[in-house]
Each structure stands twice: as C-alpha cells, then as structure tokens.
Image (spheres, coloured by chain):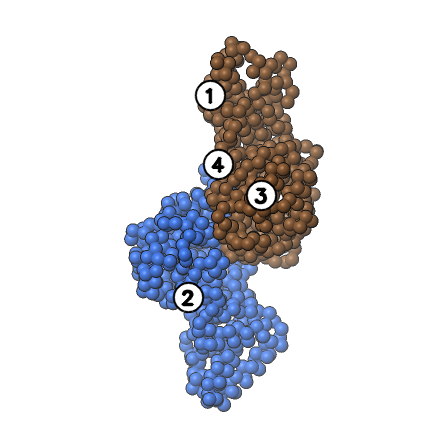
Chain colours: A brown, B blue
Amino acid sequence: MTSTPDARPLSDLSAQELHALAQTQREAHAAQAAKGTKLDVTRGKPSSAQLDLADPMLSLPSATTDRAGTDVRNYGGLTGLTELREIFAELLWVEPEQIVAGGNSSLTMMRDVLVDLLLFGAIDSPRPWAKEDKVTFICPVPGYDRHFALLEDLGIEMVTVPMTDEGPDVDEVARIAGSDPSVKGIWIVPTYANPTGAVVSHEVASRLAGMETAAPDFKIFWDNAYAVHHLTEDEAKSADIITLASGAGHPHRAVMFASTSKITWAGAGVAFLASSVEQVAWYLEHLGKGSIGPDKINQLRHVEFFGDADGVRAHMRKHAEIIAPKFAEVDRVLTERLGGLGVATWNRPTGGYFVNLDVLPGTASRVVALAKEAGLSLTPAGASFPHGQDPDDTNIRLAPTMPPMSELTEAMETVATCVLIAAAEQLGATTKE
Amino acid sequence: MTSTPDARPLSDLSAQELHALAQTQREAHAAQAAKGTKLDVTRGKPSSAQLDLADPMLSLPSATTDRAGTDVRNYGGLTGLTELREIFAELLWVEPEQIVAGGNSSLTMMRDVLVDLLLFGAIDSPRPWAKEDKVTFICPVPGYDRHFALLEDLGIEMVTVPMTDEGPDVDEVARIAGSDPSVKGIWIVPTYANPTGAVVSHEVASRLAGMETAAPDFKIFWDNAYAVHHLTEDEAKSADIITLASGAGHPHRAVMFASTSKITWAGAGVAFLASSVEQVAWYLEHLGKGSIGPDKINQLRHVEFFGDADGVRAHMRKHAEIIAPKFAEVDRVLTERLGGLGVATWNRPTGGYFVNLDVLPGTASRVVALAKEAGLSLTPAGASFPHGQDPDDTNIRLAPTMPPMSELTEAMETVATCVLIAAAEQLGATTKE
C-alpha cells in the first residue's frame, strides 16, 4: 500500500493525538449510523449486472437433444453432457473422460465425496474413513468458511497451516501429512484463493502432488472455484494438479471441483468434478445410487450459451469489466484512509471474489461489531478459520462484488472508520500504561 | 382377466397339445427375433409426447425475481421458492412450512436423508444409525429396485413383506417393527405403487402411523412419486400420513418424497421433501452444509408454467390422455393372448407407470431371457426384490409409457409369446414324468 503524504503510523502518535483521531472517527461512525443505510459486503455473490450477462440463457436451450441425439429432457446421463464436459475439460486442463458435469453446486459434490469417503473409503483406502479412530484435514488459513463447516458437521478434525503468496506453507503441510496417518486430506483453493487471492505456484503444487504422506489415501480437495475468474490481463494458470499427482505416483490423490456459479448464475449453474478415471468411476458408482442423472437441459442451455471454451473466456472478460473497478475502489478507499498508518494490510487480488484485510491483532472482532453498529454487515471475524476461531483476531474478509459502486464506497469508508477506532482504542489502552 | 372363448388352462392340455402350442409359439418367437427390431419396456420413462407437454418451459421463466422480490438467479433460499412449495403442499396435503423444494431428484433427497440418519441420527434417535450393530428396513415386495439398491449400497439390511391391494401386509409390518429394534424404517410407495399399482388405504396408513415400534426413531419413507399420476377419473387420494402419524403421537415418523420428474421433465424437474417442521429443520441443517440453495430459476419456471395446483392437475390429465391408451393396449394384448390360460396374472392400474405381471412360478427368468433373444428388453426378473432375488421367480415389471404404440403392441405380443413358451416348457417337463 502507498501511504498518504502526511501519514504517520498510529503507534507514533501521542496519547493526545490518538484521542483526537479517535474522536474524529467516532463522529464519522455516529454520522454513518444515523443515516440508517444498510450495507453488506459479507458474501461473494455476483451483482445483478453480472447475472444479467447470462440472461440470454432464459430462452435456451433452443434444442432438446444433445450432440449424440439423446433427449435431454428425459432421465439418464449420469456423467453429464459430453459437449459441456469437453468445454470445461479444456478450461480446467483435464481430459473429458476425467470430468463429470453435475447439478448446480460444487459444494454438494464436495460433501458427497466426503460422505462417500466416510461411508465407503476411497479406492486406495484400507477401510471406510468412518472406521478410523480419527480423520484430520489440513486447512490453510485464512480459508473458505464453508469448507470448514462441512468438515465440522462430519466430525472431521482440522489442523491449520498458514497461507503464503504461493499457496499453503508446503513445508508445514508435508511435515504434518508425512507424520500423522490420521491426516487424510487438505483443502486447496488453487486460483485466487478465498480470501487471500493467492495462486498456488507450480512448485507448491508439485510438492503437494509428490510429497510422501503417512495415509495411503491422502486426498487434495482442489476447489478451483475461480479458475477463470481473472480481474486483470495477468491471467493466472492453475497448476495441473491431477497430472502432477499422477506423474508422482499418486494418481488418485487430487479431486478437482469447479462450477459456473460465478460464471453464469450463482443459483442455477453447473458444477464439475474431475479426478483420475478410476476415482471418477468410484464417485459415479455411489452417485448413481441416488441420482438418475443431472439436469441435462440446464447443461445444454450452458453449452448453447458458451459455444466453446473461448466463449467462457470471453464471458469472463465481461465480468471483469464490471467487478475490477470495484476491487480498485476498495483499494483506493483503504489506501486513502489507512495507507501508512500501520493499522491494516490488505491485498490487491488479480482474480477471484475477495479482499483479505488484516487489522491490528486483537481488533478484528471489534471492527466487525463497530461496523454492525453503523449498519454495515461484515463477514464475522474468524469466519475464515476452523470453528470460526482466528487466534490473532486479525482477519476480515471483504466481498466487494455484490453492492453497487456507491454503496461499496460507503461500505469501505465505514470499514476504514471502524478499523481506525478499534486501532486507536487498542493503542490508547497501551499508551495509557 | 377375461378369457378368450376357446381358452383352456394350459395345465389341462395333453402333452401333445402342449407340444403343438409350444411349437407355434417358438415359430412366432423366431419370426420376431428374425425381424431384428429392438424393443424396450424396462424403465418407467415418459415418452417424447409426454415430455413435449412441458416444452413451453423452454422459454420460461419470464421474470427473474420471485414473489418476495428475491433474485432467483443468485445464491440462497435453501427451502426452495415459497410459491412452488405452496402448490405442492396443496397437492400432497401438507402445510407449506412442512415442505422443501429441492433439485431435480427425489431419489437424491432419499439418499441424503439415509446418509444423515447414518451419520447423525434423527432428532428422535438415541445415536447415529451407523453406530448401531445393524439397521434393517422393511421392504414390501414387489417394490422399487432403486429403493433396494440404495439400502444395499449403504449396508442397510432388508426384510420383505408382501404387498396387498391396500398396501403392505400391515400385520406383518407391525409384527416385525414391533419386535426388532434394529428395524428402523419401511419403504412405501403409497399411490399407484411401483410396480403393483396398489394404493395404500386409509386403514393401512393409520396402522403404519400408529403402530408401536421397537425402535424409537422408526421412519416411514413415503415415496409419493405418483401422487397425481392418475390414469382414470377414479383418482386415488393418498392417505395423509404425516398428519396421521403426528396424531398418533409419532410426529417425526413419516418423511414424504415427490417430484415433477413424471410431470414436467424426467431429468429437469423439481423434487420435494415433506415431514414435521422439526424434521424438515434437521434435514435443512445438514443440507445447508453442502448447498447454498437449489436451482430457483428452474423452480420459478415451474411456478410460471403451472400457475397453481389446478394447473398441475390439468397438466396431468394431458399425460393420462397419452398414456392411458398404452395401459389399455397392454391389457388388450395380454388378455387376448394369455386370458384364461392359467399361466399369468397382471393388474390394471388406475395410475402410475407400471403393469405388474406374474407368470408361472419358476419361469420369470426364462421369459426375460427368451424376450432378449427376440430383441425385447424386459426389466430383469427379480428386479423388484431386494438384491434382485425373487424367491418364486414369478414377477416381471412392465413399463409401457416410453415406446410408441406400435412398438408397445409388438412388445406385448412378444411378452405373451415368451410367457407361453416358458409355461409350456415347464408344464411339459412335468407332463413327461
């Protein structure tokens, strides 16, 4: 972050100066609260303008048979439409026979895989995971709250490792996975991670793919939710984890997930699962007990809308045109209000849906509470950590895509105000001693 | 069944007469095989003409907000659209707050509930079902093969009871459920059962709802797949199992499932789950860990298409116009060819998707094999029994909706031919001794 010309770190201020600053910010806070405006930057939801981009789909498909001539209105076709699988195989760097097109939620596919692992075990498991004394997942933090909630609900324990700019701290991951056979998996959001925006480097991916693990059936849950969700022309390419793992002698280690939830419609897209051909067959075997096939009409609707992989890429550039200015606005306000003050750091993601804000340790909960008083909903402090517990109480996830620009500006001004009040309170308490 | 004027039971024929009959039928069989026509009456799939009825949905919805003004394109709304729940609450005789509208498959909801019962237990369970030594389901037979496959995959044992014209043999059900605490549930297809077409009477439903069970958390899986799928003006009304169970002091006993798979599109409909408000909350709690909401666009599409519950009823009468003649044709051919011969009985369902054919004990597998030789695919003998084992080898499920009428006639003629050959073989073997 650049600092404003006259910015001095708050820790350099005298008690009197700190008091004056806090007073000014409290007045701004009270003024915002008095307006009664309701603002919300909690969830990574597309805005109406983004959803509008897919509205031509409302009158698709124009046909009711797929390329093979099968009636998409009827039962069947558990793997999903071949032509849709081909498009996303290209985008996700896998072979069409390695990918399944499903319903409207990759989160559902993740839960299904976890449930199947618990009840049946994987093709390389000695026994169902539920028969183990304990199952543990490595959770890079900060991470995606729904990943952690899923594990918590299923009774799977969590051990955290720090995120770096290149993905998880892979030395820590290798140490933990290499020594503890109860450690059966890891969550990775490889491209524009939720919430840090980090992209897993080829080196980190290679280590994850090749490392020795104490469990013979260690799984990488590779949630490539933002694979094509670029904000700049510097488009990150996801590491090809399935090929890397296979090449390292662990063909069934990686399971990739993706969806069009943030490409077409958040509630009515198509989700994908990819892995080794054998592991895909294992998934389909159990899926087929509770499904006679996905919504192939919605899949054909997507095929007709996109045409091909380049159609998806072109569509994503339209999203970037809408949301890149919002990310720029977050950075502008935070820089202007907090730059050089030593009370917050944040990232400038080149893709994805989040800005990761770290405030003074011990103040994140206070910032969220202050924001609420002013009418601004922030993701609860700690949400990006297992069980909602951020040990340093420092991390706040900002989701700038949903609000209109004017509301976003107001929300970020309010965030800055709350960060300053909380910082002044904490530094003031220290200064007094 | 009425008999043809000159029909004599095959068991009354002399060895010579039987031989002559078999010879005639074998010639017909050979002729059919020589034609090389491929016929299929295996699965209960709607025909193209039925699917066409819903084609106006291809350009719906016309709006992108629901009645409450929520954007249906975005995430959220785990319970499904209120207006769609209201329509199906009326049709299924429940309150809107007791019903959830989900994705395209009620089978998926059934599997989800079974998985949740195994992993977490119900709200009235002493422990997760997976922690029990054994879990057993009562399976009325003949029944739906996918119900049984689901249990088999999940390691749940099955005990059978016979179906009657009023539903399962409820004395047997009460005896088994009342004495064995491992017996945790029962499958019921209450309206136009798959495959017998039976409708559960109010008396049987009341017994099921009120009976004492050894397990405190006994569940009735009430798969009301054919609730509105009438073939005649004599429209069966499903017993109101949820109210009956609640009134008998077992509010969480029944879980109802339904879908529009055989109303709009088999692959792209909407599925429903209904139960007590508390049990619905339990279901949603776990569902919400793996879902941010169903495809609300498809739900709104259905709401606009139907308008209201009467819209669904009117739509179902169009289905009946298409498929009732097919059921009549099955009965016509079987009566003409097999009536009075004492080698087969079958039902004349007033709704649903199947005709249940019982042939001479010990000959069902032979009939299916003979049909295959002649180019006709029949559901495997035994499919309507747990583990595919029909102890009497007598039951064959016919699904007449999918083939065009000319193919259906040819298929039923072939069925009759194969039934006669198998019967003559069996009776001939006896006669020879």
The answer to the question of whether label 4 and label 1 lie on touching residues, with beta carbons closer than 8 A, is no
Q: Which mark is residue A109?
A: none
Whole-Å distance between the Cαs marked 4 and 1? 30 Å
**Residue at 63% of width from left, 16% of height from top?**
A4
In terms of image quadrants, where is residue A321?
top right
Instruction: Specify the subunit that label 1 lies on.
Output: A
At which x and y percent is residue B433? 46, 89
Whole-Å distance between the Cαs marked 3 and 4? 24 Å
Q: Which residue is mark 2?
A: B141
At which x and y percent is residue A112? 52, 49
Whole-Å distance between the Cαs marked 1 and 3? 52 Å
Mark toward the start of the polypeptide (1 vs 3): 1
Question: Label 2 sits on what residue type?
Answer: Val
Question: What residue occupies the far top of the structure in this picture?
Answer: A16
**Residue at 63% of width from left, 18% of height from top?**
A3
Q: Which residue is mark 3?
A: A179
In the foreground, B414 or B135: B135
Q: Which mark is residue A387?
A: 4
The answer to the question of whether label 2 and label 1 lie on touching residues, with beta carbons closer than 8 A, is no
In the displayed structure image, the side of residue B195 where residue B166 appears, left or right: left
